[in-house]
Amino acid sequence: MPDYRRFRVPGGTYFFTVNLLERRLDTLVRYVDVLRSAARVTRRERPFHIDAWVVLPDHMHCVWTLPPEDDDYSNRWKAIKIRFVRTVGWGECNEPQRIRDNDGGVGVRELTPTYELQRIVNNHVESQ
């Protein structure tokens, strides 16, 4: 199991990459409206600013800024993932074999926050 290090800064800006377990599926783009709705409801309950969000068929990249005195991105992601999977169904996030084997959780692997946000923004966002 990976040894993730969580760097938490209240009011910080974070870069995330979130993957489906089954990289061959196109669930995220087929149900992008459900994903938007899950994020919108979560933002109402636990505010955060979306600086950037790119959705691809099997993964997405996001840049969020949390409110001052708040560093809890984990529960925000948990809420988004739960809402998304409850709406589209577990089968849309996993291959049938994984469902039979009860392998794959809710269909989204561990979050990967990147702490070199300024370099990423300079190289990829501002260069466009």
Image (cartoon, rainbow, N blue to C red):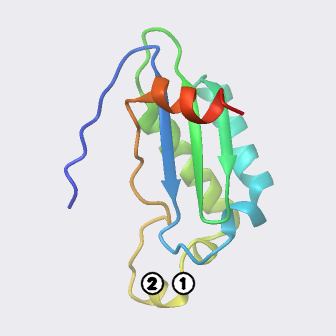
Q: Residue furthest right?
A: 33
Work out whether residue 24 or residue 79 is closer to the camera in this orientation and state it: 24
Q: Position of residue 90 (x, y in %)?
A: 57, 72
List the residue tagged with mark 2: 98
Tell me what residue is drawn at x 44 percent, y 17 percent.
70
Q: Amino acid at mark 2?
A: Arg
Q: Residue furthest top?
A: 68
Report which quarter residue 62 is drawn in: top right
Quarter holding the N terminus?
A: bottom left
Q: Is residue 69 left or right of residue 55?
A: left
Mark linked to residue 95: 1
- 109 shown above or below 46: below
Tell me what residue is drawn at x 75 percent, y 45 percent.
37
Mark linked to residue 35: none
Q: How many marks?
A: 2
Tell me what residue is drawn at x 62 percent, y 28 percent.
45
3D distance between C-alphas at marks 1 and 2: 5 Å
Q: Is residue 1 left or right of residue 53?
A: left
Q: Position of residue 16 (x, y in %)?
A: 49, 41
Tell me what residue is drawn at x 42 percent, y 10 percent.
69
Crowding around mark 2 (Cα neighbors within 10 Å: few <14, some 14 to 19, many 20+) is some
Crowding around mark 1 (Cα neighbors within 10 Å: few <14, some 14 to 19, many 20+) is some
Q: Position of residue 8 (x, y in %)?
A: 33, 24
Q: Secondary structure at mark 2?
A: helix
- 76 shown above or below 21: above
User: Mark 1 near mark 2, Cβ–Cβ under 8 Å?
Assistant: yes
Quarter holding the C terminus?
A: top right
Q: Position of residue 20 (x, y in %)?
A: 53, 65
Q: Amino acid at mark 1?
A: Glu
Q: Secondary structure at mark 1?
A: loop
